[in-house]
Amino acid sequence: MIDVRISPVLIIGTGLVGASVGCALTRAGLEVHLQDASPTHALVAASRGAGTIDPIDPEDVNLVVVAAPPRVLAPLIEDALATYPNASVTDTGSIKGVVLAQLRAGGVDLSRYCGSHPMAGSQRVGPLTARADLFEERTWIVTPHDNSSAKAVLAVQRIADLCGARVISMAAGHHDEAVAQVSHVPQLMSALVGGGLLELPVEHLRLAGQGLRDVTRIAGSDPGMWTQIISANASAVRTELEELSEDLQQLISVLDDPAQVTAFLDRGRRGTRRLPGKHGALPADYAQVVVEIPDEPGALARLFSDIDKAGVNVEDVAIDHELEREVGRLTVLVDPGRAPSLRTAMQAAGWTVRD
Amino acid sequence: MIDVRISPVLIIGTGLVGASVGCALTRAGLEVHLQDASPTHALVAASRGAGTIDPIDPEDVNLVVVAAPPRVLAPLIEDALATYPNASVTDTGSIKGVVLAQLRAGGVDLSRYCGSHPMAGSQRVGPLTARADLFEERTWIVTPHDNSSAKAVLAVQRIADLCGARVISMAAGHHDEAVAQVSHVPQLMSALVGGGLLELPVEHLRLAGQGLRDVTRIAGSDPGMWTQIISANASAVRTELEELSEDLQQLISVLDDPAQVTAFLDRGRRGTRRLPGKHGALPADYAQVVVEIPDEPGALARLFSDIDKAGVNVEDVAIDHELEREVGRLTVLVDPGRAPSLRTAMQAAGWTVRD
């Protein structure tokens, strides 16, 4: 059996992700050492329970986790392979193919390296925000390459496991293509629609409903962070964008043909329905019950308490505020069979139920 | 002063919109007569309180509301102008320019006609779902043309008012451009992204997060209904799509230039921020507090009750379900200054607060 002892672990880079890995592994009883280009960061991470800043004999390190910004990943990984001769080495970057290509170009033996991508994070980036449960129930993608040793792969799977994450294995290029499709391209398309709003007259924007708000919500994200991600994955992103660009031009050319417009919309609906829903199940068709809520503390508590008394399980909720008076609408998604009785119960409890 | 007496009103077409207008006007004390190509529909609408199916002398009708599907609007309006010589005539179609052009091509005197578009509706379409409050606090766009008489315009504004709607006036072409921008094009862009998911491997889709779900939510709408809307507004939609198509091609061409990618993303964020937020105010930057919720009846009620006890006003909420265990996360948006104390209070009440 392969020896997958991973303690002691050295974490290089103690931002949110590195420090949180440290907290989770420390909690699991492992010996964790911390390093950061900023000694203060490492100290703060140590104070949060991520590990120790005490030095360690390089020969003793069994696993190195490089949790640094994209542009320095490859040199730090290469350096770690040279400095810690007995250690497996992984990284936590959100793009895998570019880093692997850079490492391969360096010509070093990569058998002790296996990439990974824990899919968690936050707008907040420092070690002060570290938490041992950051990765619990999140997806952690492990990206072995052709020459990754079984020991390195198992070591990475083991830390993902100790962090409470769900492990998925994927080749690096495959990973980058997948995140381009389900994350980077939707981000850019949202920004595309958002950018189109920039020149609109204010009176047009006043007609906007919830649909436009949903489509453009993620366009409100930090451009700096997303530029780093998209630049690192430009090749996979370009491939996907070119396909969408062709689809869009095709749509424009058939806009006068209702049958083709229907086919386009139907294709969109069928694609959307492929997204896994709640608990991995297919998306269900829920019924919605819309209740008017006064905008005051306690209204939601009373509302949910009354929904609870009606004995109906809430599948999802959304709050939609009226533009010009102090009132909101709460849309509650429930099992279609329960919607009529919920409407009746809410009306009986004095709430205004709307369409 | 102009005589804007509108009673008795004749409503032609008693689907959800026509019957709901009837309910609201009847409630306001007006005499409302109902007509529908399907006598059963008119009968059901009458039974819902939308008005009477009793015949009325054409000379006596003061206002005709044509609430019929897009493709029959123009002939029905023209017919109403001929049949009811003393009546102002309006319609409730969601596209205004095409209908006006068709009417103008007919060569009849249109001074008694003024279009309108009540921005309310529902997936449900029959008179059984009619309700007097359907238009309350919704936007009702009135689209006078150059030759609309003041009397016709005032009559339409008056029914919108009696229905409890907010009235906005706009030229027909202007209206169609605005709804293309804030409604039809976002719908198509959502479908474009949704269509891109159709060929993806299932294991890629498993990596999808909330962002992709938001962008593609409206792509789940009924293709038939949207084909009618988009076909009727194809010209304005095409103009907007062509601009977005150019922006997309421009993005593809600069994908290797981080400064240009940032500029693109920043443009998207600035555009999105122009959307009116709560109560017509600018969107605020709220802080989010994420609490883990067991998926069982009563959990949300207890949760909101505890949030209420913490004395914090909830600005918005979203529920995000874990894929593979029976637990959800509730994201609560609150004033940034109140977030830390809410987190503390929720933890003290036994909830798991997450990033």
Image (tube, coloured by chain):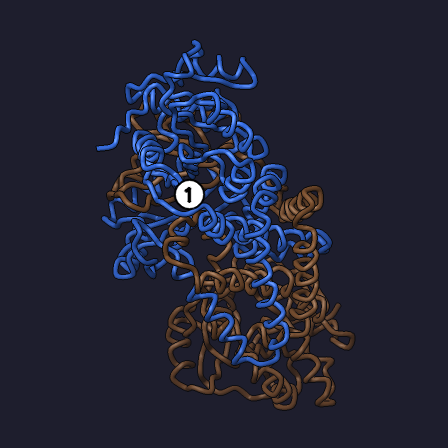
Chain colours: A brown, B blue
Residue plotted at (46% across, 23% down) = B129
Residues A47 and B115: in front is B115
Q: Quadrant of residue A228?
A: bottom right
Q: Quadrant of the C terminus of chain A?
A: top left
Q: Is residue B316 above or below residue B22?
A: below
Image location (x, y in percent) of residue B163: 33, 30
Q: Which residue is mark 1?
A: B145
Q: Is residue B334 above or below residue B61?
A: below
B113 relative position to B237: left or right: left
Image location (x, y in percent) of residue B300: 39, 40
Q: Quadrant of residue A320?
A: top left
**Disc 1 residue type?**
His
Residue lying furthest top in this view? B54
Residues A92 and A58: in front is A92
The kind of secondary structure element at disc 1 is loop
Q: Quadrant of the N terminus of chain A?
A: bottom right
